[in-house]
Amino acid sequence: MTYLTRIHDICKLVYSAFSNKEAPDWPIVVNYFYVTGKMHSQEMKDPTKNFQSFYEEQNYLMKAIMNLDEVKVRRSLEKVNHWNFMGTMFAKNNYIRGEKDVLISMLTDLSRAVIEAGLPVKYSFSLLDELIQKVELQNNIPLFNLYMQELIWRYFRELKYFRLDHQLPIAERCMRYIRNNINEMVTVNEICNHFHCSKTILCRTFKEKYHKSINIAMREIKISAAKDLLVKTRYSIKEIYTQLGFTNASYFYRVFKPLVGMTPKQYRLKYLITK
């Protein structure tokens, strides 16, 4: 008889002793505490009630996320402490596999919810694939509830930022896109394709808002970041311009010097001397 089987039998005896009824053959979950090395048994619960509760709480959570109702999301997360128990229903002989199945099922439902709420299908599926791979690579999930909440908040933030972006005027959305893609050498045509807008309209509205062209704005943002990296890090000049999407030193120097008035090396030396 294994140790876990003995624990299960002891729990059934205790149940019978206090209730004067025959104990139901419900599964018992044993969690290991990796900090103390000790373990404890989780409370036995009626599986049918768990399934019903799981379904209702998950529906409540999905609606809260679709409405970007942070208060209701937090309220919902306070009630999901037993969700990892559902793992035993799906994989009784492999508790970790069961936990992963619960998370993957939840991620799939989250993906459907945010698509219905407006997040692009392609992006949502890409996010789903990324997070499922992240779950599958876990050897164990000792802090299941915290890990689950991290995944839920990731979807909440993605939907929130997407809606914020699409509520902004096109010029501001363009500027956010440039800043968010500072590590790449994006083109005006790529930005137009991303926002499904006319190049003429985008360039005109951007210049009206910021009094400069999109190309000049991209250069200024990259060079501003380069200046910070030159004085705040020990990265080589090659590492810096590579991080910012420049393909070679010659192009980087041609953009940097007219805007700053000196070469990257001179700028770094001047800062060090000043300090």
Image (spheres, rainbow, N blue to C red):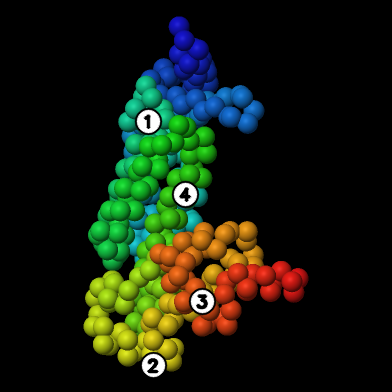
Q: In front: mark 2 or mark 1?
A: 2
Q: Which residue is mark 2?
A: 208
Q: Which residue is mark 3?
A: 256
Alpha carbons under labels 2 and 4: distance apart: 42 Å
Q: In the image, residue 192 lies at what x, y percent?
A: 27, 77
Specify the amino acid type for callout 2: Glu
Specify the amino acid type for callout 3: Phe
Q: Quadrant of residue 210?
A: bottom left
Q: Is residue 37 above or below residue 190?
A: above
Q: Which residue is mark 4?
A: 149
- Of label 1 and label 4, which has the lower sequence position? 1
Q: Residues within 10 Å of mark 2 (few under 14, many from 20)?
A: few
- Of label 4 and label 3, which has the lower sequence position? 4
Q: In front: mark 4 or mark 3?
A: 3
Secondary structure at numbered mark 1: helix
Secondary structure at numbered mark 4: helix
Q: Which residue is mark 1?
A: 97
Alpha carbons under labels 2 and 1: distance apart: 56 Å
| Residue furthest top in the image | 1
Q: Are marks 2 and 4 in contact (CB under 8 Å)?
A: no
